[in-house]
Amino acid sequence: MVKIAPSILAADLLDIKNEVINVDDAGAEFIHIDIMDGHFVPNLSFGYNMVKTLRPITKKILDVHLMISPVEPFIKEFIDAGSDIISFHPEADKNTKEIISIIKKSNCKVGIAIHPNIKIEEIKEFLNDIDLVIIMTVIPGFGGQKFLEDQVQKISELKEIRKNINANYEIEIDGGINYQTSKICIDKGADILVAGSYVYGASKEEYKDKINSIRHLT
Ligand code: DX5
Ligand code: ZN
């Protein structure tokens, strides 16, 4: 079954504690936390304090997506804040290898996020060392954008490489996920789907139905 990671970027921040508890109760496996710095992406969101704040209220996987540059100076804070997985964009820092190794030495898992302009070839050298690949199906920076369908071929590419090099990263799709686009990703073999506006755009009574609908189990 595909795992679902609601993105709190689209949550009601005045009620963030319940927004996380509600998707947790609704069966989400991950909580996706988008960190934006107004530099790597043209928008600001949260810092590591958000991770620290949410840590005590859920046992679900805190899936931290860093859209910041540089990355390395902030890694320790995100580890100490209680992240379960930290993903970053390799073009945002020259020390990709070093960052992967710092995260792996802690109790955290590590992921690489691929901007739509980046080819799989460009991150291939890291694929043996990581736990997660995030394929961006929107230009990073904002929730609520249209799904870039030309990116889904990267799912097949990554599955093929995973088999060939005997790696075990999971494949997560981030951006523009809804009832229709989730089906496309699942058919290609995605392991995890991030959903911001599709889940949090509904009323809280509907979170469970929304999450289940993008699993396409029936
Ligand atoms: C975009 C973020 C996404 C975003 C997804 O930069 O990385 O995680 O929150 O939001 P939706 O699901 O609304 O496209
Ligand atoms: Zn994200």
Image (cartoon, rainbow, N blue to C red):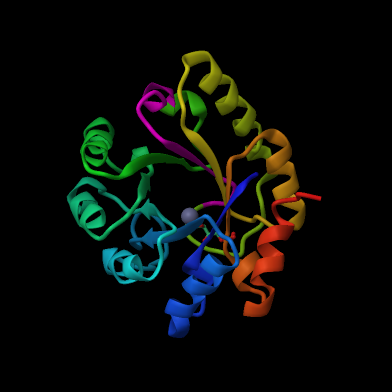
Q: Position of residue 156 (x, y in %)?
A: 64, 28
Task: Please provide the residue range marked out in magenta.
Answer: 124-139
Closest to the observer, 84 or 179: 84
Q: Residue at x 51, y 80 (%)?
A: 12
Q: Residue furthest top?
A: 164
**Res. 121 in view:** yes
Q: Is residue 6 above or below residue 136?
A: below
Q: Position of residue 123 (x, y in %)?
A: 42, 28
Q: Is residue 134 above or below residue 188?
A: below
The answer to whether 147 appears left or right of 120 in the picture is right
Disc tally is: 0
Q: Is residue 127 magenta?
A: yes
Closest to the observer, 126 or 189: 189
> Image quadrant for the N terminus?
top right
Q: Position of residue 81 (x, y in %)?
A: 25, 60
Q: Is residue 12 above or below residue 159?
A: below
Q: Is residue 203 magenta?
A: no
**Res. 203 in view:** no
Q: Residue at x 35, y 27 (%)?
A: 129
Q: Residue at x 74, y 59 (%)?
A: 213
Q: Position of residue 147 (x, y in %)?
A: 66, 52
